[in-house]
Image (tube, grey):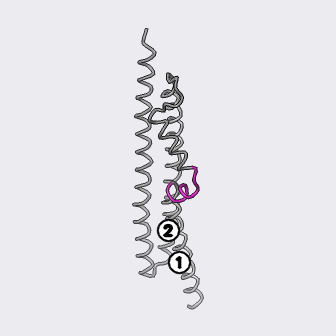
Amino acid sequence: MSDPQIDLRSKYAEGCTALRHYSLCVLNTRTVTIAQGFVILTAAIYLIKDRSFGASLVVCFFGLSFTVVLNRLQMNYWIHFNTILEIVMRLENLGNSDASLMGPWSAYSELRNERHGKRKWKILVVYGPYYLLTFALATIIMYCVAMLIMRACFQ
């Protein structure tokens, strides 16, 4: 018969590994979002300089679609992270008779919830790259549409 303490330790270790994995997935997704944002915006602006407003619109709509996909991917990773974090915190506090002593993930969760509960933090940090990229692409789309309308009216 196996020792239940060892089983709890292995579950906790596996949970910590999964938390690090999903945290890295979120970071990588945000990095990809920022990089693709630079590429898409550069391509759209280059096409505008060439007065290829239709092509710029296509690039912008692709950029918006890709941004939505990356945002949903990040949200999926965060759902997994939050679920595993709850379990790891329960494992951390399982044998703890002193409620004032927190494990590292419980302390992290408390600080994270405090930050993510603030509207400013959520807008700028959690969703910031997606909001900024969406705003930039929408602005370029409006500009391209206005230029295409002007071109059609004055020809």
* Residue drawn at x 50%, y 35% as measured from the top left: 84
Kindly state the secondary structure of the residue where label 1 is placed: helix
Q: Position of residue 59 (x, y in %)?
A: 47, 68
Q: Are marks 2 and 1 in contact (CB under 8 Å)?
A: yes
How many circles with numbers are drawn on the protein?
A: 2
* Residue drawn at x 45%, y 48% as measured from the top left: 26
Within 10 angstroms of label 2, few (less than 14), some, or many (20 or more) residues? many
Look at the image and say whether residue 109 sits in the magenta stretch: no
Amino acid on which the number 2 mark rests in the picture: Cys
Amino acid on which the number 1 mark rests in the picture: Cys
Say which of 136 and 69 sits in front.
136
Residue with the most extreme top position: 1
Q: Position of residue 128 (x, y in %)?
A: 50, 59
Q: Is residue 20 above or below residue 2?
A: below
Kindly state the secondary structure of the residue where label 2 is placed: helix
Q: CA distance from mark 2 to mark 1?
A: 10 Å
Q: Is residue 27 above or below residue 50?
A: above
Q: What is the chief secondary structure element of the magenta stretch?
A: helix
Q: Which mark is residue 24?
A: none
Q: Position of residue 44 (x, y in %)?
A: 45, 72
Which quarter of the figure is the C terminus placed in?
A: bottom right
Give left or right: position of 127 versus 39. right
Which residue is identified by label 1? 144
Q: Earlier in the sequence, mark 2 or mark 1?
A: 2
* Residue drawn at x 49%, y 78% as measured from the top left: 53
Say which of 32 and 129 sits in front.
129
Which residue is identified by label 2? 60
Which quarter of the figure is the N terminus placed in?
A: top left
**Magenta span:** 117-125
